[in-house]
Amino acid sequence: MTQIIETCNDDERRGFFRIEDQIVLRYRILPSDQIPNRLDEVVLRETPFSLSASLELINHECRSLSARLEKKDPDVAEYLKLLDQKCSLIAQPVFAQAEEQEELDAQKVNISASGLAFECSSKMVEGDMLELSIVLPPSMVMIRVYGRVVYCIEQTDSPESPFRLGVDFAVIREKEREILIRHIVKRQLVDLRNKNTDE
């Protein structure tokens, strides 16, 4: 089945909420000969990142159905929960191998479903294409997107990360955008609950 990937136009970007967050982020500049000529070239093969995104969306649907099924047939609901645990155990080695290749230190970002901004140690040029590998705590769902540098601002007050980088997602799968939207909404709800508790 062909996977859907999308680019965002300016109106869509303005429509997405942005939050301050901490994520695990790894990125690299794509050499010109590795930049896909057509957008569908980036989804020719599945990776642990795309599998993780697919499983997260399936889990979201299962949680909704499971709540309804538990009222009608608790035994079937319990059986399906055990099957879900079994599938999770089978998938763990695949994701563990991918996580070992990623830096596990979370960093502060400003993120939306259309892009992100973060501090970095290397200067980049507007228009540079990046491959971004993202892990979203606390679910630790992994996604991979492709972004284009839209600005790189020098910061004099941060010697360890002297540049602030703005990146627009140029290529993002529909399922990965949906995961980002769900993650951002959950974070907003958590922040709102924390704010109400403090008051």
Image (cartoon, rainbow, N blue to C red):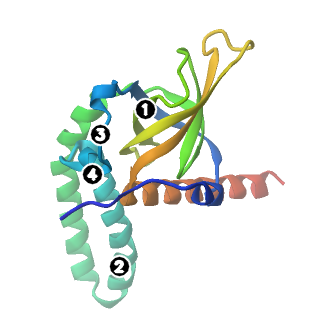
Image quarter (top left, top right, bottom left or bottom right) of the N terminus: bottom left
Q: Between marks 1 and 4, how big is the CA–CA gap?
A: 16 Å
Comparing marks 2 and 1, which lies closer to the viewer? 1
Q: Which mark is residue 65?
A: 2
| Residue at image mark 3 | 36
Q: Between marks 3 and 4, how big is the CA–CA gap?
A: 8 Å
Place residue 77 in its image quadrant. bottom left
- Residue that protrudes farthest toward the front in the picture: 37
Q: Relative to 123, is 47 above or below? A: below
Q: Relative to 176, is 127 above or below? A: above
Amino acid under label 1? Met
Tag 3 and tag 2, C-beta contact below 8 Å: no
Q: Give coordinates of residue 198: x percent, y percent.
A: 79, 51
Q: Relative to 122, is 109 above or below? A: below
Q: Which mark is residue 129?
A: 1
Front position in the image: 168 or 60: 168
Q: Is residue 30 visible?
A: yes
Amino acid under label 3? Pro
Front position in the image: 91 or 1: 1
Amino acid under label 2? Leu
Residue 194 in the figure: left or right of residue 125: right
Which residue is drawn at the image coordinates 84% and 54% (left, top)? 199
Tag 1 and tag 4, C-beta contact below 8 Å: no
Comparing marks 2 and 4, which lies closer to the viewer? 4
Mark 1 Cα within 10 Å, few/some/many (few <14, many 20+)?
many
| Residue at image mark 4 | 40
Q: Earlier in the sequence, mark 3 or mark 1?
A: 3
Place residue 193 in its image quadrant. bottom right
